[in-house]
Amino acid sequence: MANQNLVDVFNVKKRVVVTSDVKDYEVFPDKEKLEELRTKIVQNLIDNKIPKNLSLEQYINDEIDETLQDYDLEPLERNHIFNLIQNEINGYGPLTDLLDNDFVTEIMVNGINDIYVEIDGKLVKDESISFINDTHIIRTIQRIVQPLGRTIDASNPMVDARLKDGSRLNAIIPPLSLTGPVVTIRKFSKRMENIDDLLRMGTMTAHMALFLEACVKAKFNIIISGGTGTGKTTLLNILSSFIDDEERIITIEDAAELRLHQSHVISLETRMVNYEGEGEITVRDLVRNSLRMRPDRIIVGEVRGKEAFDMMQAMNTGHEGSITTLHSNSPDDAINRLETMMLMNDMDLPVNAIRNYIEKAIDIVIQIDRLSDGKRKVTSISEVVGMKNDKVCLKEIFAFKEKGLSDQGNVRGEFVVYKYTPKVYDRMKRKGIILEDIFGE
């Protein structure tokens, strides 16, 4: 059959990119034809109609050859269709390649032809990937979450799950979503596993890294503050790597993302309500329980409610070296949010008492932000220095100062270290930690 007929029947569109005299083809076959072929192959798998003398790969090849025998497909076009079918059977459909791509940090499916990805901090629409229909999206979600013991359907139209690699998936479908199925996957970054990765990406300076390492080893209580998608959990994971291997670490998360490599780590994860509306286990429940588990360190993935009071209580009763994150736009805002969350408790405590609690519990506040160019920076490292006018006071030790944008739209700026010896440095020195290159003797 002529190539024109191929285009008519399969609606094949080619986009050719020439690089070093090699042509790369991206092929987009007719969705209905592709779905018909996929359904046929999957149904035959279910019905065990695959000949015993054929492997799955050979069977798929034969089916594609038979279905497309009248069309003059080039090898790259045929391989593209084979990979699409293979991904549907053994992978996660159109999302397979995105999930395998280490440079993609976030995947957002807003509709069958409306897929966005985050690469190097920038959100771009991926025109090369699409779904066949809404049912195809829901089927892909089910394939991802079913091995995790989760499900999604009309009676349970929302799911939040952690994938095996630590990535987090959130999906919501009709009737809750009026625009059709929506999927958001925040991938676990394999490119950000140690402090050297943060230095390489320009997230902080070597002096900042040395100081934060010293803070963890000196068992200071640390709050990591930042907005959504700024890298709080990644930074928490990296700072946790500085904890001594002999310590007993309890981690508490809604969806376990932390990847600690110490030998004595106990990971706790919350539980949502079941179909009867019972069985919920909250972060607060786990924080309270962790105090009975003889922890050397308590690490809470994120505080966002009443558990803040229990966390501050733990920090004030001898559980040094605790680390947690919270959503806020500045170090001062982080302290204010802690106050608000602690006031959410039913206990009738005056504001001044709560602020004294925070002042005695928290040592260091780290602010991490995503700048307008998509890059992530630790924009402030501050210490709690006491109370003034009945408010918790912070003093900045390191900061990133923006100076505008380059012609390419990149944020220009510089890291600064203030001519100031932090109060916490005396405590460091008493524990044998000396940072002469930063603060002198």
Image (cartoon, rainbow, N blue to C red):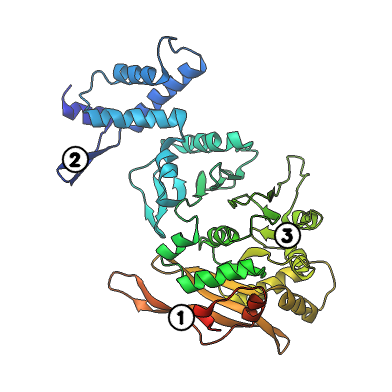
Instruction: Tell me the CA gap for discs 3 and 2.
Output: 58 Å
Amino acid type of disc 3? Asp
Q: Is residue 74 left or right of residue 256?
A: left
In the foreground, 211 or 68: 211
Up the image or down, 8 lies above or below 357; here it is above
Q: Is residue 8 visible?
A: no
Of the image marks 3 and 2, the number of the one nearer the N terminus: 2
Of the image marks 2 and 1, the number of the one nearer the N terminus: 2
In the rendered structure, are the residues bearing label 3 and label 1 in contact, judged by CB atoms less than 8 Å apart?
no
Q: Please report the residue visible at 38 percent of the width from the left and 67 percent of the height from the top.
A: 373
Up the image or down, 339 lies above or below 120; here it is below
Of the image marks 3 and 1, the number of the one nearer the N terminus: 3
Instruction: Read off the residue under disc 1.
Output: 416
User: What SS does tag 3 mark?
Assistant: loop
Label drawn at residue 296: 3
Image quarter of the N terminus: top left
Instruction: Tell me the CA gap for discs 2 and 1.
Output: 48 Å
User: What SS does tag 2 mark?
Assistant: strand
**Relative image position of residue 322 (x, y in whole percent):** 68, 64
Label drawn at residue 23: 2
